[in-house]
Image (spheres, rainbow, N blue to C red):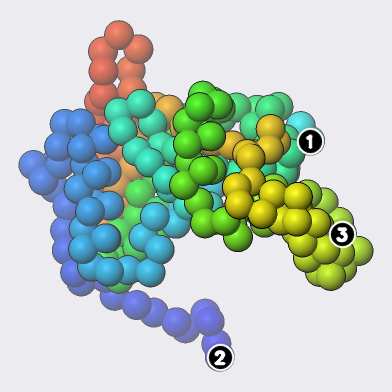
């Protein structure tokens, strides 16, 4: 397949300043709700980009587990590469891509660890098998085999047959946005893009960006 010749025209919508809420959190909630209503597969999936001590960026898909004016929440292993990156550089970027709606949302901001009681509550709400996997996996580290990992899980479940406590190395983060961008695909690559920037002491400013 010649990927240089692949073309797709975006025709499903447009975006004007008058369409947007003055509050980017409200606007994000509306677009996320539209993605949920469209029954997209994992509409809460988002690409998280971080930067390590060596200046090298890395990206991976994680799941949004909450959003409010306080920020956007996700959970992971604090010892993973993304966790180590965030310890060094607490700024990150998120990207939501909903191709069926021809929409994209970018979010940037500072990341903080969630309060332990919130991480405890979320971990307790997860299926037992997911708890076991998260507690047993040395995420991002080399392991000798899948069998080695499965034995670690089996050992943990033997010790905790009913309830697995949240390990200290696993928990949540909250990204506190200072930048949102809403993108709507248009014909001929003349896409509609609007950015919200948080200005100190002034609140959110909205402006159109060139496609």
Closest to the observer: 196 or 50?
50
Q: Which residue is mark 1?
A: 54
The residue at the far top in this view is: 201
Say which of marks 1 and 2 sits in front. Answer: 1
Which residue corresponds to mark 3? 143
Residue 189 appears in the picture as rendered: no
Up-down relation of residue 32 to residue 150 (above or below): above
Dot 2 falls on a residue whose secondary structure is loop
Rounded to the nearest whole Å, what is the CA distance between mark 1 and mark 2? 37 Å
Q: Which of these two is toward me, 199 or 26?
A: 26
Distance of mark 2 from mark 3, alpha carbons? 36 Å
Instruction: Kindly state the secondary structure of the residue where label 1 is placed.
Output: loop
Q: Between disc 1 and disc 3, whose residue precedes?
A: 1
Query: Residue 211 — which label?
Result: none
Report how far apart the C-alphas of labels 1 and 3 lie in the structure.
24 Å
The image shows residue 166 at horizontal and vertical percentages of 63, 39
Q: Name the residue at 43% across, 27% down.
A: 176
Q: Closer to us: mark 2 or mark 3? A: 3
Left or right for 63, reference 152: left
- Vertically, is 19 above or below 196? below
Marks 1 and 3 close (CB-CB < 8 Å): no
């Amino acid at each position: 397949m010649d990927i240089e010749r692949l073309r797709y025209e975006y025709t499903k919508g447009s975006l004007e300043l008058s369409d947007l809420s003055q509050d980017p959190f409200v606007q994000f909630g509306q677009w996320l709700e539209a993605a949920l209503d469209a029954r997209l597969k994992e509409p809460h999936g988002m690409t998280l980009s971080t930067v390590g001590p060596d200046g090298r960026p890395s990206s991976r898909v994680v799941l949004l587990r909450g959003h409010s004016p306080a920020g956007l929440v996700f959970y992971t292993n604090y010892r993973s590469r993304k966790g180590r990156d965030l310890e060094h550089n607490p700024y990150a970027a998120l990207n939501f891509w909903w191709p069926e709606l021809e929409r994209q949302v970018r979010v940037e901001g500072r990341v903080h660890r969630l309060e332990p009681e919130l991480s405890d509550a979320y971990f307790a709400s997860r299926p037992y098998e997911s708890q076991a996997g998260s507690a047993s996996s040395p995420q991002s580290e080399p392991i000798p085999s899948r069998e080695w990992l499965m034995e670690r899980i089996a050992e943990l479940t033997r010790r905790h047959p009913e309830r697995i406590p949240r390990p200290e190395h696993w928990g949540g983060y909250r990204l506190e946005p200072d930048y949102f961008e809403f993108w709507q695909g248009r014909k001929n690559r003349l896409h509609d893009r609007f950015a919200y920037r948080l200005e100190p002491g002034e609140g959110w400013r909205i402006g159109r960006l060139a496609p």
